[in-house]
Structures are given as C-alpha cells and as structure tokens.
Image (cartoon, helix red, strand yellow):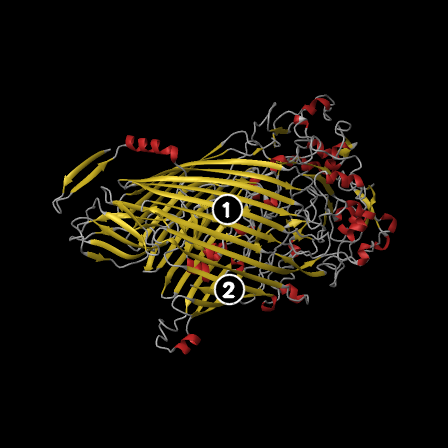
Amino acid sequence: MKRKCEMTTRNKRPRCKHSTNGTSIVLWLAVSAPVLMLAQTFQASVSGIVSDPTGAVAAHVKVTVTDTDRGVSFTATSNQDGVYLINNLIPSTYRVTAEATGFQTYQMNSFPLTAKQAAVLNITLQLGSTTQTVEVLSTAQMVDPSNATLGGVVNNKSIVDLPIINRNVLTLMALQPGVQPSTQNNYSSNFFTSAIRYSFNGGLESTSDFQQDGISILNQSDIPGIMGLTMLPSVDAVDEMRVQTNSYSASFGRSGGGISTMVTKSGTNGLHGTAFDFLRNNALNANSFFSNRSGAKIAPLHENQFGGSLGGPIIKNKTFFFGVFERDINNAGAFSLFTVPTAAERGGDFSGDLNAKGQLKTIYDPFSTTPDPNNPGQYLRTPFDHNVIPARFLDPVGVKAASYWPLPNLPGLTNNLAKTAVSANPLEQITSKVDHNFSSNKRAFIRYGYLYNVAGSPNYFSNLADEGYGPMTVHSHNVALGYTQTLGDATILELRAGINRFNALRPSNGLGFKLTTLGLPASAEAYLEQGDVDEFPGIAVQGYSTLGNNNGPYYESHELDYIFSGTVSRVIGKHTLAIGGEHRDYFLNFLQTNPLLMNFGADMSQGPNPRTVSATAGDAVASMLLGTGDSGSAGYYARTANGNHYFAEFIQDDIKWTRKLTMNIGFRLEQETGTTERYNRMAAINPYVLNPISKQVINPFTGQTPWNLYGGYVFAGGGTDSLGNHAIRRIEFKPSPRIGIAYALNDKTVIRTGYGVFYGVPYAGATREFTSGAFTTSTPWVATVDGIHPNTVVSNPFPTGYFYPPGNSQGLLSAVGQSLVSANPPTIKTLYNQQWNFSIQRSLAASMLLQVAYVGNKGTHLAWVGGGGSASMNQLAPQYSALGNQLLTLVDNPFYGIITTGPLAQKQIQYGQLLRPFPAWQTVASDGTAIGNSEYDALQVSFNKRYTNGLSLTAGYTWAKLMTDVSDGIWSSAGSIRSHYCVRCEHSNGAYDVPHRFTLGAVGELPFGKGKMFGSNWNRFVDIVLGGWQANGILTLASGVPLVFSTAANNSYTFGGGQHPDVVGNPVLSSGKSIYQWFNTAAFAQPANFTSGNLSRTYTGVRANKLKNIDFSLFKNFSLTERFKVQFRAEAFNLTNTPVFGGPGTTVNGVNFGVITGQSNPPRNLQLAMKVLF
C-alpha cells in the first residue's frame, strides 16, 4: 500500500491519499481469514463521505456517535477518500459530531438508527474553529441509498401498541409486502413450528431464517425440510424487528431468502420497566359462525398473560441489564363438527344411508365378488337384502372400534356431531440480557432465554380414540454472546456464539390403550410394544371422522445446536470490505412411534361392479364393520441420534463510487456435510444397484434366471456400497453470488436493484428420515391383493407374521418385498432461490417513504413433499395404462417362497406389479426428491410514516403470482402428483398463491390533552377524562388461495401415481354461491378407470374465501407522575366478527363436496389489559 501526502492550500494540513493494489488486499484477506466468521449482525451502521465547503473530500476527520440513552461513544476517522464507517451500533438514538482542525464542529443531536440499518450520513464541514459548532437539523433517514435490500422495520412503538393476539410479535411480519402467512388469517400460533409458517416472496414456508440479536434461534426440526423456533421472546423484550424479504448481503445464508431479526432490549442509564396483565375470557368473545348455527355455546376461554420487565445501569455509561418474565395461563376451548355413524349404521343397518343428493347408497357384500360372465376382466357383487348387513357378517373388531365414536347429537348423516372441548396451554418465559462496554472500542453482550410451553389439543371424544394430538410440552434454553472490537481506525472485529437447547415430549391421546381391548390378536400388541407403542390405533374411515390419530402418536425430541459466527470489516478507500464465515452444529435425538394404522374405504362395499366408483354404492363404515379394509400397517421407529454440520465463508465489498452511487458485491460459499447418526443407523435408496435377489427369481417374461432386479438400501458404515458415515455421499458446495446497486437521484429519490442466489434448508438435515426401512420398519396389513377381493380381515390382520428391522445385516436384501420409503438418494440436492428486484424509493416528507418494487424469485431443486407426498419411483410407465384390466389380473407370483411376509408373499399378485420399475418392492418413494420448481413475480408497494406527531402508518400492497409444480412446502395440501414421469405436467398456481394482499397498521395518539393540538390548556380533571387516548389497528385484505380437488378413490391403477378429477363443465356458479354450494359440483367427475384426470393440480377458477380482517385497540393513558404511567387497554381481534370460511369440501362425490363446514379465523375476541410503565 502506497501513501502519498501533499500540503493543501486551504488549511496548511497534509491530505494523504492511498493507492491500494490487488496484492495488498489479497494479503490482508489471507492474514485475516483464519479468525473470521459470519457477520449476521442485528446492529446498525452509519457511514458516509466527509467533504469541505467546496465539495472536496476531507480526510482525517474524527466522527463520533454517542448513544444518548447510554452515554456510550464510538469514533471513526475519515480516510483519504473522505469515507468513514461506524458499525455494530445497537438500535437507538445517537448524537453525531465531526471534528477537524480548521473546521467548525459539526453536530447532529438526534440521529435514530434501527436494526440492521445501513444509514448514510454525508457530512459537509464549514471553515472555522473547532470551538465553533454548526448544529444540523436532526432527521431520520427515510430512503436507503446504501443497498438494494427489501423489507422494513417494525419499531418498538408498533410492537408494544399494535393489537397482537397471543402476544406473538412475529405476526407483525405480515405487514410487509411479500410476506404471506400460510393460513388465511392474521393469527399465528406460538408453537415452535407453527410460529414461523410464513412464505417470503413465494419461497417455501418455514425455510427462512429467524434471528435474535444476530444469531439464529432455529433448530433443525425433526420434520424434514423445515426449521423450528426454539425461542419466541415476549413482546416486552423486543426493541425492534427487522424483516428482510430480499437481502443481497453475502453475510446471510441457509435461508429460503427471507430473514427476520428481533433485537432484544438493552438497559439504559435510567431505570425503566413495565408490569402488565392481559386478560381474555369467553364472556368477552363472540360465537363462531358454525357454533352459533348449530346452537352451541361460545367455546370456553380463560387466558391471563402477566409479567414484567426491568432494565437499567449496573455501572452507568458502561454496563447495563435488562430482563423480562412472562407467564400465560391459557385454558382454551374449541368447537368442531364431526361426521360419525348413527346407532343404526353401527349395527349394520344402512337402510337410511343417503348420499349428498338424497340417493340411497347400496351396500354390497365384498365376499360375494365373482367374475362378470358378460364382461371379461370385470366383476360383480351381490347387495345385502334391505341394505342391512347380517349379524354373522359383522367383524367383532370393526364393531368394537365403531363404538368409540360418540353418538350423533345433530340430525343427518354428515356433520352430525357438534362438540366443544378445552385444552390447557400454559407458558412461561424469561429473557435476560447484559451489555458491557470495556472501552470505547470494545463491547460485549450476553443473553439468556428460557421457554416452557404446553400446546394442548382438545379431546372432543372424551376417550382414548379422539383424533387430536396429545399435549406437546416444550422446554427450551437459549444462550447468545456477542463481542465487538475496533482495531485501529478502519478495522472492526465482531464475534457471535449461540447455543439452542430444545426438548419436546408429546404422549398421544390414546397412550396406554391395549389392542386386545378391540379384540385384536395379542401377537400384534406384543409386536408393537417392542417399538414403544402402547396406544389406540389410527383408524381412517373415508367420509367419517378419524378414530385415533394417524399423525399424532407418541413423540419426543431432544435437540442441541451450536452456532459460531463473526466478521472482520475494513474501510479501504471507497471500499468497505468484510470477510467472514459461520459454523453450525445440529444434533437431534428423536423418537416417534408407529402405531397400528388401518384404512377403510367405500370400495370394499361398493358394486355391482366393485371397480366402478359410484356415489350410490358403498360406505366406509360398512366396509369397517365387515372387517374389510384397504390397507394398514404396524411397526415402530428406532430412536435416533442424528447430527449434521454447516459451514459458510463469505466476502462482501460495499463500494461508494460516488455520493450517489453505491454497489454491493458479495460471494458466499456454503457447505453441508449431510446427516450422520451416532450408530450409523442410516440408509439411502440406490435405485441403480443390481439386487442379489435377482439370482433367485425366475423372470416371468422369459422363464429364465436371473431376473435383473434393481434397487435397494445402501448404508452408512463399512462394506460395499457404503455411504461412509453420512447419509449423503459427499459434501455439497453451494456457491452464492450476490450484487446490489443503489443510485440516489437526489436526497429524496433512490433507484435500487439487485440479484442473488440463496440456498435454503436441506430437506435431509438432522432429521429421522434416513432410519426408515431397514432400522425402522412396519408390517403391512394386506387387506386386499387386487383391491376388490378381501385377503385378510381386521380381526386377524397379520396372519403370516411380522417384519422386524433387519438393520444393515442383510445388505441390499434388506426390506426386499416391503417398501423402500422415507429415505433419500445419496446425492439429494439442496433447494436454492434466485431472487432479484428493481425498486424506486421516494421520501414524500421528513417522515414518509413510498416504495414501488418489482420482485422475482425462481426456486430450483425444491423437495417433492406436502400434498404430493413422496416421489413415487415405482409407478407404472404411462404406456402400460393401455393394458386396462389386464394390469389387475392375478397371476403367479415369481417371489412366492422367496419373500415370506407381506403382499409379495402371496401365491398370486397382480400382473401390473411385474411391470413396475422395481417389481421386488411395493412402494419405492424417496422423500424430498429435489425436482421441484417455482416462479414468483410481484409488484409490491409500501408506504411508511415514522412515528411523529403521535402517528405512525405502515401500508403494503402485493400483486403477485406464484407458480409451482410438485412442491409447495411440507405443510401444504396442493394435490397429488399424477406422474413421476412428467413433473412439468403439474405446473400450476401454488397452494399459497394469493394474487392480491393489502395490509395497514396504524398507531395513533388522539390529539386531545396536555401537549396535544387540542386541550393543552385543559384543567387536570378534564385532561384525565378526555386526554391520553390512543387508537391502533391492523387492516388485512387478501384474495383466497386456489382450491385443490381430489377423487374419493384412485382408479388410475398406475401403482403409485396420483389422480385428479375430470372437469366436465364450468365450475364457477353464475349465481347463488354460498357455503352450501361454493362451486358447481356437477362440473367435476370421477375419471374413467386407468386415467389420471384432466384437472390441474390446483384450480384458480374457484378460490377459498377472501380474508377481511380488522384488529383494533383503544388505550387510555394516565400519568401518575412524571416517571410513572398507567395504561388501560381494550383490544378487539376480528373487530367486525367477519368469518373467513375455511375451504369447501373438494373430494368429488364426498359427503361435503362443495360445502363449507368450518371457519379458518377465530370469532371476535376481546382482550383487556393494564400496563404500568416507568
């Protein structure tokens, strides 16, 4: 680095210029690299160019910013290009001064900074003496000329004053354009996976990063492909929240593109705090629409949230503390409608069983199935006399299981049970933080958080067979540390560390149930108990409410995460260079049981042709009473001890080319090691390996041996085809280039644009999925071999024995004859998003900002999950559908005697099984196969008015379109995928496609009383009555999401492919749309046999109900003294009690087809509160 100095004529001081060559920069980076980690700071910065009155840059100017609340100062010196930078400033209000010999002292007394703000303050000095001071008018910067990041800040005033149900601060993210909740209401649960169910600019929900004080507070959830929240701080603990929907800084990663950062409050030189008590009660609430219609009372509710906060100095101007305690006593009731069989139906009498059109549903005898002599390949069944099943046909297990349904308490055959139930949901949390300033250039903080939460589930049936989850109990601990040091005038070191400890336990509602109580064999009970299963089975009955819970069995999860990060940044000429990296360790010990599951459909009691789906034949309860099901399984999961490791390095260069032009160039390289398991209990699917069973099986098409059969599990550990000790063969390198440009046309208008690549959460993180198949297994209930003839009845579902986990002892022969499921190919890719935007910002006044932006997002390698299920690799090729009934013909089984348990142990199997790509297996399904794509385009408009003169406003409008094919996220139900062979055939609007969304948040002090526009001279009594009022509210308007239609039974017979309905008319009603008929049900039909339907995966011609919601609050503030204030609140959520109806029934010929039976938003809830502030 060369230094050239010359004497200036203006003040006889030397001005020095540095010329930097590439070698010196590389050398500096190389020397610094070993100590560097990622700069995921929550703090703000201020930078700019210092100039003299002529516009020439001024070097060696001392710039000082002082935190006015804490008395702490930070300094920097402008370099040879006049550039200065002071960063790592906590959100606060600062005093800025600039001093240099020969110039008057520059002073700005109030310069507010928000979380993650990169403020630009260009300073112009005036000639004179430093003893003279030029005071500059204080102002908050509105436009952002430093980068192209989109998003916004939710300031403390909005956080503490806007009406927030459940006091969940994350719900305020939805005020930003491009942020879409996954549910059609404004209300988010505080639960660890539900609280972060947001999509940022069309990205997958639950894949964005959530940080507190610059450190991620997410864990690698046991649910593949998403993260879970370990800590949700109290509203009174959060100072600000920065929501970034597009951030082009290379310092951020492992996110689907969005980042939300909560900043914990810090103590100040004064002692400040709050005490609060919030109350909700059913006496204050309105009734829900459907509860009111059925005559049910308002669901019980008693919620009391109380606590307090305190912050202040330990050593003034040096060390500060802040802490919050909050407790929530929450006993919440809920109302729901169920469809249960009548007393007559439970006894086998279906003489009054009518479908939605009032037609009798004839019940046929499945044991009478015989070939149709007039139609080769077709079959016939005989109906039961008078539509009554004789007692001798009733299966005792089916009858006993049906007795666990409560009897109807409403008329009719559908939605004939109305129930209200209460669950307890207590919560306790602590947040504490200490900030310490060692000196003006060294500072640190430490934060600790604790959370105890129970997410209860109402037991509507009041027995062990209720379909709800058991209560989930969570204990979570969070520790964060940060250290910042200024090294010289131009270099800053920042280090971060975090630990997240998360423990969750959920016993099922049916825990402790003995299967022999139903009449099931004792051998089944003994088998399940080996897998820690001792609970009521999950019984799914088509068209009726579920018995037991298919998805909520016993569950426990113990997670531990370590996060280390930091950065070194340096100003070199016009460049602000930063280099860093990050390391994360995720560890998960997990168990979820796999109870006995049984599925019953109408197909086993339909006719006369059992292969023809009809709305006038068959009933799933009848099939259940006959003991004839569709499928089922019993087994268990292994306890796992998984881990994975994440590394990232980045370099960022922010270049101030001129006062108007700033460019941000960054590059990030991420690596993910892939999952490991402490005892190597992992397997992945290798579809290309030749399986050794080939030598034993005669090829049915040639009559010769071998029959080349491909596929099998490969394992972690040693041996042939080993994965090493990872479930993914290699480390995946993820390059992420990013660039942003900001150009200031003037002080009020900025044009910005940017592009970046962002890698999200790998689907195969530290999850349980790799244990399935060989280390976790299940025994299938082969209820039928061909879909029409009963094979085994429910009272004896496993006559040939049980599968036990073979581990890796059998190598490629493991699980032959079963299914290769819940595992991934060893080369699975991680999803990534390409994001870009173009925006124009305009400051309309000193406190107002208008922004108009175009935003694009292209998702690649999205996991095939959600409504589409797993990628079915064992589906018949499309050309085989032309064979029709021949596919279903029973033929000799070439595996008979070789495979001894399960469907392929039968003497005969269907001919179509032999034509599958992997005929030696049933399902071959790779979870999260990374073949999905998405495209998102949006116009986003935002308006912000900072809090001035008693009023703040935040408004946002999004006009967007989201297109996807096979992936809408783990939670979505965006329809089945018809063909593994044509992913693009499923290209349609995404499940969360919302064309229009408008939000408005407002905080306003009414202009009456002391110090206000009106009433400043009122006496104390009048001021107490009429002054101190404040009104706040949130308005949300949004389009409905597309509907997803399905068929009651899949008669495509593709051996693994999905099916959509056929559209045979116009689904849109010309008039008369109501909750009883949301669309034209006659426009949909069950597809013909061996076809997959012509309807798209989602249908936008008919959408779910629009969202219209107002949350409102009214405050009355009383000033007891100058220091103490008491605030009374009345808050109304869904002020107008406008129901947002849930989606209608979309199963063709289903009992609720076209009918809406639920409400997706809560009815009006009132909340009363009192706060003491000092």
Return the residue at label 1. 478
Of residues 433 and 197, the one drawn nearer to the viewer in this rendering: 433
- Which of the two discs, 2 and 1, sits closer to the camera? 1
Badge 2 crowding class, 10 Å Cα cut-off, few under 14, some 14 to 19, many 20 or more, is many
Rendered view: 790 above or below 1123: above
Q: Is residue 218 above or below residue 181?
A: above
* Residue contact between numbered discs 2 and 1, judged by CB atoms under 8 Å: no
Q: Which of marks 2 and 1 is nearer the N terminus?
A: 1
State the mark number for residue 824.
Answer: none
Q: Where is residue 339 in the image (x, y as percent from the top left)?
A: 72, 57
| Residue farthest toward the front in the current orientation of the protein | 315
Answer yes or no: is residue 160 visible: yes
Give left or right: position of 125 versus 1009.
Answer: left
- Identify the element where label 1 is drawn: strand
Return the residue nearer the eye: 808 or 501.
501
Quarter placement of the N terminus: top left
Q: Is mark 2 on a helix, strand or loop?
A: strand
* 756 with respect to 676 (left or right): left
Residue 223 figure quarter: top right
- Give whichever of 285, 656 is nearer the camera: 285
| Residue nearest the observer in this picture, 368 or 1117 | 1117
* Three-letter amino acid code at the position of disc 1: Asn
Q: Residue 1110 carries which label?
A: 2
Q: Where is residue 1029 in the image (x, y as percent from the top left)?
A: 43, 70
| Image quadrant where residue 954 sits | bottom left
The answer for how far apart the CA atoms under marks 2 and 1 are is 35 Å
Residue 602, percent across and down? 75, 49
Q: Relative to 383, is 1143 on the left or the right? A: left
Instruction: Specify the quadrant of the image occupied by residue 1051.
Output: top right
Amino acid type at mark 2: Ile
Picture coordinates of residue 1105 (x, y %)? 57, 59
Quadrant of image for the C terminus = bottom left
